[in-house]
C-alpha cells in the first residue's frame, strides 16, 4: 500500500488509504423542468470551488466528468482539526486542502457519512481520493445526494469508456484550481 492520501475520521478511523448519460452541459444535477441545466464552472459559490473544469469533457470519461461535479475543494478549519484527529498519522493543518462531497458539505461532521472528506497528500493522489469518495461515500453513505444524480453517476460508471487522459490530468487540474503541495499536504494558493 502506498500513502497517496489520508481520509477523514469517518473513513476507516482516519487511517490512511491506498492508491489504487450526463448532458454535456449538466452540472451533475438533473435538468430543470424546462430541460435546461447549469453549465460547468470552476466555482459554485464564492467560497466553494468545484473540482470540475470546463476541459473535463474533452479529457475524461462521462463518469469522471460527472464525478468531478459532485466534489468540491475544502480547506480544513479549526473544527476539522479538533474533530478529525482520531487515527490520523499526520495531523491536519489549518487551511490544508482536501476534497469533499458537495451534497453534504453543510451537514454537521457526524452526519455526513463515511468518506465524505479526503485529504490527499499530493496532487497525484487526487484521482484515487475521488475514486474512493465515489465508491465509499457517494454510492453508499451519502444521504444528501439526489437519487437522479446518483442514478446518472451509476449509468455513466457502467458505460465503461476509457479516459483520454490519466491521473496526470487530475493533478494538472488541481494545479489549475490553485492547489499546491507543501510537506506532504495540499493547500490552496491565494
Image (cartoon, rainbow, N blue to C red):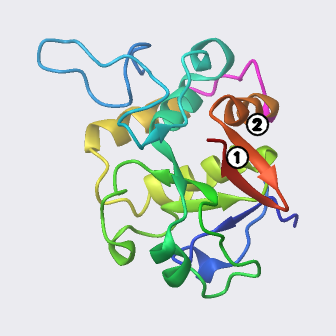
Instruction: List the single residue furthest toward the bottom.
Output: 86
SS under mark 2: helix
| Residue lying at 80% horizontally and 50% vertically, measured from the top left | 181
Magenta-colored segment: predominant secondary structure: loop
Helix, strand or loop status at disc 1? helix
User: Residue at the left extreme?
Assistant: 33
Whether the magenta-drawn stretch holds residue 163 is answered as yes
The residue wearing badge 1 is 126
In this picture, residue 158 sits left or right of residue 79 = right
Are the residues at dot 1 and dot 2 in contact (C-beta closer than 8 Å)?
Answer: yes
Going 60% across and 88% down the picture, which residue do you hit? 86
- Measure the alpha-carbon separation of dots 1 and 2: 7 Å
Residue annotated with mark 2:
171
Residue name at image x 38 percent, y 33 percent: 44
At x 37% / y 20%, what residue is drawn? 26
Q: Nearer the viewer, residue 19 or 178?
A: 178
- Is residue 130 visible in the rendered image? The answer is yes
Number of labels in the image equals 2
Does 136 appear above or below 171? below
| Quadrant where the image shows the C terminus | top right
Which label's residue is closer to the chain start, 1 or 2? 1
User: Is 154 a magenta residue?
Assistant: no
Q: Does residue 139 appear in the picture of this structure?
A: no
**Left or right: residue 136 compared with residue 125:** left
Q: Position of residue 91 (x, y in %)?
A: 69, 78
Q: State which region is magenta.
A: 159-167
* Quarter occupied by residue 153: top left
Say which quarter of the image contains residue 166: top right
Q: Quadrant of residue 75?
A: bottom right
- In x, y percent, where is residue 7? 63, 68
- Label 1: how many Cα within 10 Å (few below 14, some 14–19, many 20+): many
Amino acid at each position: 500500500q502506498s500513502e497517496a492520501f489520508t481520509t477523514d475520521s469517518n473513513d476507516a478511523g482516519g487511517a490512511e488509504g491506498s492508491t489504487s448519460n450526463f448532458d454535456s452541459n449538466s452540472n451533475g444535477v438533473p435538468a430543470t423542468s424546462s430541460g435546461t441545466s447549469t453549465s460547468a464552472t470552476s466555482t459554485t459559490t464564492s467560497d466553494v470551488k468545484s473540482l470540475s473544469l470546463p476541459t473535463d469533457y474533452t479529457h475524461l470519461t462521462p463518469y469522471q466528468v460527472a464525478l468531478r461535479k459532485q466534489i468540491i475543494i475544502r480547506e480544513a478549519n479549526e473544527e476539522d482539526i479538533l474533530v478529525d484527529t482520531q487515527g490520523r498519522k499526520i495531523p491536519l493543518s489549518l487551511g490544508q486542502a482536501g476534497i469533499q462531497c458537495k451534497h453534504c458539505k453543510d451537514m454537521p461532521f457526524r452526519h455526513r457519512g463515511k468518506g465524505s472528506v479526503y485529504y490527499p497528500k499530493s496532487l497525484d493522489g487526487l484521482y484515487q481520493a475521488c475514486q474512493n469518495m465515489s465508491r465509499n461515500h457517494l454510492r453508499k453513505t451519502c444521504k444528501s445526494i439526489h437519487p437522479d444524480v446518483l442514478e446518472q453517476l451509476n449509468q455513466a460508471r457502467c458505460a465503461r469508456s476509457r479516459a483520454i487522459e490519466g491521473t496526470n490530468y487530475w493533478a494538472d487540474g488541481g494545479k489549475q484550481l490553485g492547489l499546491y503541495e507543501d510537506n506532504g499536504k495540499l493547500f490552496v494558493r491565494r
